[in-house]
Amino acid sequence: MIQTKTKWYLPRLVRGMFGVHIKYFIPIALMVLVAARFNMLPPGFVGMIAILMAAGGLLSWLGSTLPLLREVGGHLLLPLFGSTLLYRTGILPEFAAESSKFLMDGGFQMVFVTAVLVGSILAMDRKMLLASVVRYVPVLIISQLCALACAFLAAMLTGTSLYDAIFFIAAPCMTGGTSGAIATLPALYSQVLGQDVSSIGGTMLAVAMIGTYLATALVIVMRVLADKLPGLMGNGNGQILQRESEALKKARENMATYEDSSADYSQLGAGIFVSAAIMVLGSVLSSVIPQIIYVAMAIIVCIVLKGTGLLPDEICKATHYWSQFAIKNIVVVLATAVGLSSSGGTSLSSVLNAGTIIIILITFIGAIAGAMIGSKLLGLYRYEGALTAAMCACNIGASGDIQMLAIADRLELLAFATISTRIGGALMLIEISIIFPIVCKAMGII
């Protein structure tokens, strides 16, 4: 989707959806919706994809275009909630809801999860990953453990069950972006519970979006404190490591990134196959170590493969291309399908309440405190450590990282923010995959 910058109170020029210029996309999408309304869609998968892309694309375009709405993640929230509204008012036919349920029951969300999880990790710069893992990743872990501990305290303060506070409020906000909330966590929970809970993806996405807004507010507060009380906040003035090794300095200066697409279409096929194969390997290893479910095991496999350099650069690039394709195309279809397949629809009012806000805020404060403690112990500047390890783990992903760092005037820390989002989100999923079954068994849920 191509966008141009504009003031917040004016419509934004969004030129296309799914790579189709908007002057062509709108009439084509309307034709599909009219055909669906009069039951003239072709049967099977073709009709399903056509109606979901048409309805979701139009709603996403509106969410990206309209003032205010685009500032609160409207490109995903409008397909999620708007599709439910269109169905309830009869504008979208029963076929749309049936198609969504069929796709979700068939594991459509796992296609997206596979693409994003594998591609995001294998696209990281290997030298940067290895050079930072000794000192930065432990800060991430300390921050996450403190955040989960504070979520436990917040649950007691608000009278919310520990089960809901940690797994359905705190966790969606700290899994490295929207993909964790809308698809990965529901898939993880479904495997443990032995039942399909994909419909909760919409609710958890709404929680994650609320978390992004609260994280933004906290970043503003942190910047003011860092400017006024630099000694207390441990302000490094843009430097994150008090004692930076030569290996890390060189890795950061020479960090390699992949382009988002390739003219060689076979690379997309390679990315799909390798991503799926890694998930299969994760499933095989999970049968040996059942305490870690296959999604989390696949994450571990990706980290090991990238860290050891066993996979050639061409394959890593291919998985990145597939990941970018999913992020730019499948996520809108997935959000639409989640909204339509939810029983009774996703209710934003059930999420936006004082208890949820308090739990998220206390969780984030715990993440900040943990990151600052970890930074002090491991030789990082506390402010920069908390900004990247905590706050960049509590937003909607890469675009959220840029937003947070821009507010803090620390865009030079994007490499560390990327580690926080990708590796930090993966670590959180591993932690949740271990804790969730234990809590469920203790509560008699499974």
Image: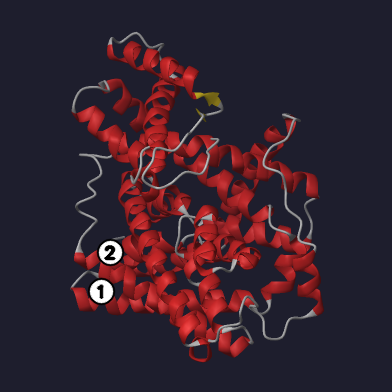
Asked if residue 291 shows in the view, the reply is: no
Q: Earlier in the sequence, mark 2 or mark 1?
A: 1
Residue found 60% across the figure and 61% down from its top: 418
Please tell me how many numbered marks the rendered image carries: 2
Residue 8, given in percent of the width and then of the height, sits at 40, 47
Categorize mark 1 by other alpha carbons within 10 Å: few (<14), some (14-19), many (20+): many
Is mark 2 in CB contact (under 8 Å) with mark 1?
A: yes
> What's the mark number on residue 166?
none
Q: Secondary structure at mark 1?
A: helix
Viewed as shown, does residue 300 lie left or right of 392?
right
Asked if residue 371 shows in the view, the reply is: yes
Residue 405, given in percent of the width and then of the height, sits at 54, 65
**Image quarter of residue 199:** top left
Q: Secondary structure at mark 2?
A: helix
By what rule are the colours in the image chosen?
secondary structure
Residue 324, given in percent of the width and then of the height, sits at 60, 42
Viewed as shown, does residue 336 lie left or right of 434?
left
Q: Quadrant of the C terminus?
A: bottom left
Viewed as shown, does residue 287 lie left or right of 220?
right
Residue 126, given in percent of the width and then of the height, sits at 75, 61
Disc 2 to disc 1, C-alpha distance:
8 Å
Categorize mark 2 by other alpha carbons within 10 Å: few (<14), some (14-19), many (20+): some
Q: Considering depth in this image, is 332 or 295 the residue closer to the camera?
A: 332
Q: Is residue 118 above or below residue 84?
A: below
Residue found 51% across the figure and 29% down from its top: 15
Q: Which residue is mark 2?
A: 164
Q: Which residue is mark 1?
A: 155
Query: Which residue type does callout 1 highlight?
Result: Ala
Residue found 59% across the figure and 55% down from its top: 298
Query: Which residue type does callout 2 highlight?
Result: Asp
